Image (cartoon, grey):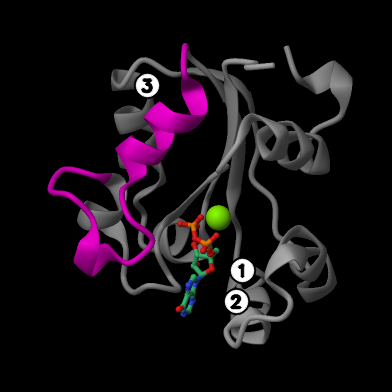
Amino acid sequence: MATNRTYTMIKPDAVAAGNTGAIIKMIEEAGFRIVAMKMTQMTPDIAGKFYEVHKERPFYADLCSYMSSGPIVPMILEKENAVEDFRKLIGATNPADAAPGTVRKLFAKSIEANAIHGSDSDENAAIEGAFFFSSVEQN
Ligand code: IDP
Ligand code: MG
């Protein structure tokens, strides 16, 4: 069932570069309502759990180290067709392939340090949102 919610996090490279505000502005201007938001930092173990589906991929260890290297800004967002529309707003994984005007084209440093996460399905949006926020925080 479509929930009209997605999960995102502004990644350590974008937070460190001072792009948090600009990215949140793009998200709001694209019509997403911020349901939940905070700033936190993952340990390598927690990043490993979050990205467990990628554990067989060659970049897994680097990804966990990068994602725990500094603060991130996790958010739950709401909009009609949230998952798909948000993936369009952020652009392709590799900024070299990302469409003009997308968050990753504007702010990503590399295929790994690519500024922002976006859930790839309604099911994963719910799982990932619950990974960072308790049910009472998801208003
Ligand atoms: P997505 O974030 O666009 O959904 P995924 O394939 O789910 O992309 O990969 C998760 C994250 O792992 C990416 O956002 C990026 O940070 C990192 N990543 C993906 N592919 C590579 C790669 O080939 N080299 C290094 N890091 C990668
Ligand atoms: Mg993904």
Mark 3 nearby-residue class (10 Å; few <14, some 14–19, many ≥20): few
Secondary structure category for the residue under label 1:
helix
Viewed as shown, does residue 40 lie left or right of 86? right
Query: Which one is closest to the eye, mark 1 or mark 2?
Result: 2
Q: Position of residue 52 (x, y in %)?
A: 77, 66
Whether residue 114 is in magenta: the answer is no
Instruction: Name the residue type under label 2.
Output: Leu
- The amino acid at mark 3 is Glu
**Does the magenta portion include 96?**
yes
The image shows a total of numbered marks equal to: 3
The secondary structure type at the circle numbered 2 is helix
What residue is at 59 percent from the left and 54 percent from the top? 72
Circle 3 — which element? helix
Q: Is residue 82 above or below residue 16?
A: above
Ligand 1 is within 8 Å of the C-beta of the residue at disc 2: yes
Residue occupied by mark 3: 28
Does the residue tagged 1 have its C-beta within 8 Å of any atom of ligand 1?
Answer: yes
Residue located 82% across and 63% down the image? 49
- Residue 35 location, quadrant: top right
Instruction: Identify the image quadrant of the C terminus.
Output: top right
Residue kind at label 1, given as amino acid type:
Met
N-terminal of the two: label 3 or label 2? 3
Tell whether label 2 touches label 1 (CB within 8 Å): yes
Span colored in magenta = 80-102
Residue 43 appears in which quarter of the rendering?
bottom right
Quadrant for the N terminus in the image: top right
